[in-house]
Amino acid sequence: RAAAAAEPPAAEEVADADADGGAAASGPPELELACPICHAPLERREGSLYSSVLGRSYPLDARGVADLTLTAGFETYAERAPAGQTTFESPLVSYAYERGWRQGFAWAGFPGADDEFETSSRYLRPAAGAGSTLVDLSCGSGLFTRRFAGSGEWGRVVAVDYSEAMLAQAAQFLSEEQAKGGASMCPVSLVRADAARLPFATASVDAIHAGAALHCWPSPLAALAEISRVLKPGGVFVASTFLDQVAPLGELIGDDKLVNPLSDALRGTVNANLPYRWWTESELKELVAIAGLTDYERLRERQYIHFTARKPESA
C-alpha cells in the first residue's frame, strides 16, 4: 500500500489515545508520503519506504520515522550546508531550544510561543477542521506541533524537520505531554525531510506552518515553490521570521521604501556574513508572489514578522 507518515512509538501514544485512555476521535486518513524526487507514492517495506519509480528505498529508523531527504541511505555524497541549518542539527541546540534558546528571540520582537501560536491559529483557521491536515514544517523540538495537536482544530498534524536531533527531541516532548495527562491530541506524525523537497503529493496538504524557520532555509525560493506545489487549492501558508536591522526604522516612519537603501547596503556587507538571512518585508512579499501565493497579510513588531498567504482556488 502507499506509505503514510510514520508515527514513532512515542508519538503514536499521543496520536491515538485521549487523556482518559480512550480512543481519540478519528481524524483524516494518514497523509500519504511521496518520493521527494519523483513525487510518486511510496510502498511500505520492512524497515524502509520504497519508490518503485526510481527503484530506491528511504530508511525508517527504530522509532518508525521516515528519512525522506535526498541522500537518505547514502553515506559518501554530501553538500555543504549553511551554518543556519547545521546549527540545529546539534543535539545540544535541540536540547536547549525550549530551555532558553527560543525565549531569546524576544529581543527581536517575538512575543513568545503562546502569542505566536494564537496568531498562527488565527491565520490558519480558514483551512482548519476535523478532516484537515496541518504540516508543521521545520518543526524543531515540536514547540508548536504540540500546541496545534492539542488545539482541537486539526484532524492530523505532520511534524517535519531536517534535523534528526530536533525530531528526537520533538518525540520526547510529545511523549512527556501525553504522560502528563493533558488535553487529548489529534494524531501526530514525524518525518525527516528537506523543506525544498517535500515528500508529499501535489495538492495534498490543507495548511503549512513554519515558525521562526524561513531565515534558516538554504533555498527559501525552492522551499516556497514546494509549499505551493503541495498545498491544496485554497490552502494556507503561515510563517514567522526575522526582518533586518533597519525594519524598525521603516516601521517608525511608516515607509520601508525610504530605508531600503540601508537594507541593500547591509545585505552586501554586514548581513552577508550572517549564518541566517534577515529579510525586508518587500522580499517576503515577492517570495510568496513568485510561488503563486496570494492574499498576503502580516503582523509586524520591530524585527519580528508573522505573515500568511494562500494558494488560489482552482479556476
Image (cartoon, grey):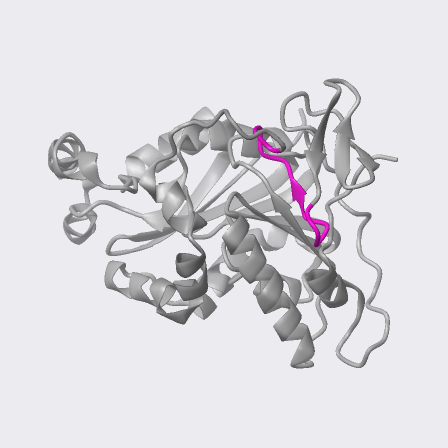
Indicate left or right for 257 with 132 as reference: left
Examine the image and state in which quarter residue 68 appears: top right
For the C terminus, give its image quadrant.
Answer: top right
**What is the span of residues highlighted in magenta in the rendered image?**
61-72
Vertical placement of 26 versus 203: above or below? Answer: below
Look at the image and tell me whether residue 186 can be seen.
Answer: no
Q: Is residue 257 left or right of residue 234?
A: left
Q: Which of the pair 53/280 is nearer the observer? A: 53
Residue 218 image offset from top left, x and y in percent: 39, 33
* Residue at left offset 67%, top offset 40%: 205
Picture residue at 67% right of the left edge, 61% below the top? 153
Q: Where, by quadrant of the figure, is residue 11 drawn?
A: bottom right
Can residue 23 be spotted in the picture? yes
* Occupied quadrant, residue 81: top left
Q: Percent x, y for residue 74?
A: 59, 29
> Is residue 31 shown left or right of residue 36?
right
Looking at the picture, tell me which residue is in the foreground, 82 or 256: 82
Horizontal and vertical percent for residue 110?
33, 61
Given the current orientation, which residue lies at the most extreme right position?
1
**Whole-percent x and y of residue 256?**
20, 41
Q: How many marks?
A: 0
Quadrant in which the N terminus appears: top right
Q: Residue at x 82, y 37 (%)?
A: 44
24 in magenta: no
Residue extending furthest toward the front = 76
